[in-house]
Amino acid sequence: MPVHKALSLGDIDQLEFFQTVSESNIKEDQGGSVLETNYSALLAGLGGSKKYSTSEGSRESQSSIKTRTLSSKIVAIKILMQSKIPLIVDDFHYISRDLQASIIRALK
């Protein structure tokens, strides 16, 4: 029969279960355009040129953050399920019948 150790607070911290979970989504779009026009002329060996340039740019950014808080009961059950360490309740028979049934239903 395997020997199980009790979980300490340090062990629980290492399991990385948190009551508050956040998800973030960032979307960025970037675009632009450049318009160049060149003029040049040559007359009797003399000439010149002119260059016109126009540029335009845009950038759009959207972000959303979803945060949810899990109940302590849900987090505790997740810890028990993932760690596969058995829960031992000493003197379970002293807990009221209603609470006993609630505990058993939650752990199933």
Image (cartoon, rainbow, N blue to C red):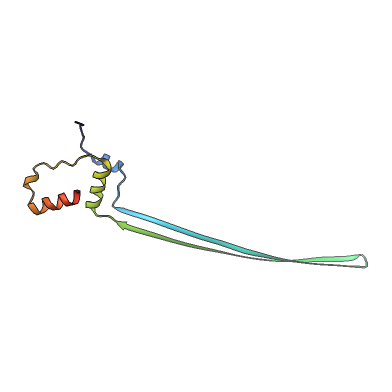
Residue 107 position (above or below residue 47): above
Q: Is residue 107 left or right of residue 44?
A: left
> Nearest the camera: 50 or 92?
92
Outermost residue, right direction? 44
Q: Residue at x 25, y 44 (%)?
A: 81
Q: Residue at x 24, y 52 (%)?
A: 74
Q: Residue at x 19, y 31 (%)?
A: 1
Quarter residue 31 falls in: bottom right
Q: Is residue 77 left or right of residue 93?
A: right
Counting from the top left corner in percent of width and height, residue 2 is at: 21, 31
Total tally of numbered discs in the picture: 0
Counting from the top left corner in percent of width and height, residue 85 is at: 23, 39
> Nearest the camera: 103 or 54?
103
Quarter residue 13 falls in: top left
Residue 59 position (above or below residue 1): below
Quarter residue 71 falls in: bottom left
Q: Residue at x 36, y 55 (%)?
A: 22
Counting from the top left corner in percent of width and height, residue 92 is at: 9, 45
Residue 47 position (above or below residue 92): below
Counting from the top left corner in percent of width and height, residue 72 is at: 23, 52
Q: Is residue 108 left or right of residue 58?
A: left
